[in-house]
Image (cartoon, grey):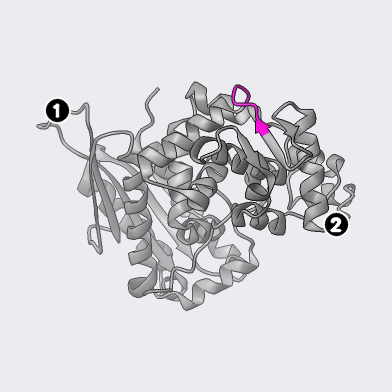
Amino acid sequence: MRKSISYVVSELISYRESSVAATKQFVKWKHNEILCPRLEAQLNRIRDGFLKYSSVAYDVQGPRDQGTDVLLRYQSEDANPDEDACFMAFQVKGEWDLQQKDYLKTLRSQAFEALSEYGSSLERYYVVLCFDARAYREQIRAINKTLSLDPRIVVVNPRYALTFLRLSESRIVSLVDGLLREEDEVFRSAKASIASMPPTQVAVLLAATYEAVFGYGGRDIQLRQVSSSTFVQRVFERCPDFSKDTWSNLEDIGFGEPDDEDELDLTDYGRSYDERFADDLDVLVDLGEFDLRRGEETVRVNMESVRPIQALLLDGNIRYGYQHDELLRFVFGLLGVMETFGAEGLDEVEDPTIGS
């Protein structure tokens, strides 16, 4: 079933919660200078990813009135040109708004204004809360209660809002791509092929497959080409040297679950990069992904086994023009490797204030 732009936006805006402490940084982000322009930019990035798969008339406008700060207007490729467009409206609320008299009354009236202005064409009205989640937790409860008057109104709490506004362009592209591929058999096969593999093993497998597909030596590749990959090295740097059992348990519960973490062995054994790389290589050989050749300096990639990953690499190269580490990071993010273990993805976050 084809995914709608409304579905994709709703999934990304509720993608992941940041920590409560991290929401303190909202105090530095001004409504007109940072928050609204950044929201527009993120919606346009979603559009760019969506348009790689589907034709849709899509327009982001801001700032607006009629109870909105940013308005997304869209029409699917199947719609009759004479049909009315659909809308998603966004109202951004910061600390300043909470300090105003009758702020709840203002919020309610703005919501009613937008619902009245766009009528049945308004699919969602997002109220994006951009302030310290700990300092204003009572206000968050009050806002949720006040705006529970219409199912089209969605209150985005500060922890989700912060994550969405900080998502990097590359992460948005991979998330949109993954959502649009959810029911794709090739994508599912690729996900299944790396099930239960720790991130470092997936990185080695991806880099080796990349060399076999785009390199000059065919499926026989030099190990140093993989071990020297900056992408592979970065994944190893980001991942603690946990035991196999710990990674397996993290796949079930993820990081950030204090009750469960107390029962996990989170010992970082601190082995060298070369030791860890050799260990992951041995596991991949045992799994039949590689065959060691020529005194263990060369591996032959089992192309039948990595065919779904090969397809994703080729698609990312053709559809987006990605190459080298950029392509590897894209497919790594597309497969949600770090997220499987409850960790933040590579290059997931960027500072919205840079370049503002």
Q: Count of labels shown?
A: 2
Q: Which residue is mark 1?
A: 80
Decide: is 257 above or below 56: below
Q: Are marks 1 and 2 in contact (CB under 8 Å)?
A: no
The kind of residue on which mark 1 rests is: Asn
Q: Nearer the viewer, residue 176 or 291?
A: 291
SS type, badge 1: loop
Point 59% across, 63% down: residue: 138
Left or right side of 224 for 303:
left
- Residue 127, given in percent of the width and then of the height, sits at 41, 55
> Which dot marks residue 271?
2
Q: Please tell me how crowded label 1 is: few (under 14), some (14-19), or many (20+) other residues with Cα within 10 Å.
A: few
SS type, badge 2: loop
The kind of residue on which mark 2 rests is: Arg
The residue range painted magenta reads: 300-305
Q: Quadrant of the N terminus?
A: top left
Q: Nearer the viewer, residue 219 or 263?
A: 219
Q: CA distance from mark 1 to mark 2?
A: 61 Å
Q: Quadrant of the C terminus?
A: bottom left
- Residue 70, given in percent of the width and then of the height, sits at 29, 58
